[in-house]
Amino acid sequence: MMSSMTPALEINHLHKSFSGTKAVDDLSLSIEPGEIFGLLGPNGAGKSTTINMISGVARIDSGTVRIFGHDAERDYRLTRRLVGVMHQELVTDHFFTIDRALKIHAGYYGVRGDNAWRELLIERLGLGPHLHKSMMKLSGGLKRRFMVAKALIHKPQLLILDEPTAGVDVELRRALWEFVREMNQAGTTVLLTTHYLEEAEQMCNRIAIMSAGKLVALERTADLLARIEGRSMLLHLDSPLDQVPAALEALNGQLEDNGQKLRISLTGEVVMAEVLQLLVKLNLPIRDLELPRPGLEEVFLNLTGLQLTNRKGSPS
Amino acid sequence: MINRFRQQQNFVSWLPFATLLQKEVRRFLRVSFQTLLTPIVTASLYLFVFGATLGQRISVMDDFSYAQFVVPGLVLMGVINNSFANTSSSLFISRYLGNIVDLLVTPLTPPQFILAYTLAAMLRGLLVGTVVLIISCFFADLPFVYPWAAAAMAALASFLFAQFGIIAAIYATNFDGLSMYNNFLILPLIYLGGVFYPVSILPPFWARLSHFNPMLYLIDGFRHAILGVGDLSLSTAFLVSGLMAAALFGWAAALLGSGYKLRL
């Protein structure tokens, strides 16, 4: 009964500095077993440093990391077997072929290698035709696929993917996410970082946003998206306007693209039918009408921007 | 897919170590022209020059030809250079290319890490030494007075320089820095440590100074075990070499244990 309550990953008051600069500053979060959890943030936010501390690549200054209830420093021999990590950088050992390298990696994790599982990974990731090629001769996409296989060869319970789709073409990206979903359905908890916010929106149950080493948000993806208050309407005009019609000032009308577009705010008690009637009455040269869906990008910019403002000492 | 994934695999505690050892051995075998053949050819050239040609005209020891004198030093030089080269290049290249993270995220313990790198380096060093020793039989008749002591001293020398290779690979910041250890430390110490001459023939000051050269104890000890005579007693050679090996092992283990320059 206890094991079902134990978080897959529990980070408490984690700190890490490099030459006096705080890379991770008092980070605490918890990931439940079976989740797909997104860790987002701008470059330098501390995402990779956090992943490096979880996986053992970086030393922990203070705080704790527990993986399925086991301390990642004290019980590292156990926790590292529970974790499979795919790093952001394309890192391979040039001396070996894919086939040999996968066998070596299974051995590093103390498993003799489930041949059927290895072959399944090779088949699913399309590595079969390249099995006996030297790593040096592989394309970036193939190396990326090999790195996924490498991270999964020992059947980890927590899969960590640090920017898995960086520099990957659309087709491979879709195949990778499909594969990750399948692994998740098989019981693997997934922690991922990505720069593609729409991917995080589609993939993750919950999302944490980091900025300057700190956690600035941690919510269910739907709740995070609901943070965006109100929507807007974007009118594409046939001929540019010089100024916003007076009747639209109450709706915070704003011109964009040298007057080619007009954005109207739909916040508060606005009734759409009244807005449309008003637009008809104004007889504006409307060519197209758009109702942009607020996305994670807005939340992301809002939160990371807010955090930067806070750091400058402004009240919030 | 899901069913296969759910079939858990048993953890074999010694397998991470055995895999790293096997990988390190495969690594030097894959480039055996560079790691085995080249040092053997170089040592054979030394043997030819000092054994079959110049050596005929040089005499530094009573009762032994120059070829008999120089062969143990050349053999040990091969052992030392290749043990050092194996750990230093393998570990440094891993650091340089970044694939060291593949080891850092695994359940490998620091003792397993150090032992696997050390044993692979010893295997390469001793393999080169053995082949050079076999080739040297064409140039000199060696008595092998204390064969086990000779084997133990060769093993000790390769162990010691495997540790030094690990230390150099951790401290080096670039390939230039790494080659400095070899060109400006190991090579001069070997050449001045009694490979080509017995230190006893040096003027007293230089002979005494040579006793601060750690290579002297390894080379003279190895030669003593093979020829039955040397500048130092076997026990002194083993004692000093053993202490040096223990100190370097402690140093390398402390570096690997702390993750210095390996873990962020």
Image: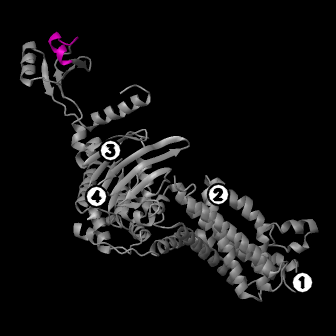
Q: Residue B62 carries which label?
A: 1
Q: Name the residue under label 4.
A: A33
- Using the numbered discs, state the Cα–Cα distance from disc 1 to disc 3 in whole angstroms: 80 Å
Q: Mark 2 points at which residue?
A: B178
Please state which of the two labelled residues, at mark 2 or mark 1, is closer to the viewer.
2
Tell me the element at label 2: helix
Amino acid type, callout 4 = Pro
Q: State the image coordinates of residue A276 (x, y, percent, origin top left).
A: 8, 21
Query: Is the residue under label 1 in contact with that under label 2 (CB below 8 Å)?
Result: no
- Using the numbered discs, state the Cα–Cα distance from disc 4 to disc 1 in whole angstroms: 78 Å
Residue numbers of the magenta segment: A242-252
Q: In the displayed structure, would residue A234 be above or below residue B204? A: above
Residue at 41 percent across and 54 percent down: it is A87
Q: Does label 2 or label 1 sit earlier along the sequence?
A: 1
- Using the numbered discs, state the Cα–Cα distance from disc 4 to disc 2 in whole angstroms: 46 Å
In this orientation, which residue lies closer to the viewer: A144 or B169?
Answer: B169
Tags 2 and 1 on a common chain: yes
Residue at 9 percent across and 23 percent down: it is A271
Using the rendered view, name the quadrant where residue A149 is placed.
bottom left
Q: Does label 4 or label 3 sit earlier along the sequence?
A: 4
Query: Is the residue under label 2 in contact with that under label 4 (CB below 8 Å)?
Result: no
Res. B15 visible in picture:
yes
The quarter in which the C terminus of chain A is drawn is top left
In this orientation, which residue lies closer to the viewer: B12 or A75?
Answer: A75
How many discs mark residues in the rendered view? 4
Q: Mark 4 lies on which chain?
A: A
Please state which of the two labelled residues, at mark 4 or mark 2, is closer to the viewer.
4
Q: Mark 3 points at which residue?
A: A208
Tell me the element at label 1: loop
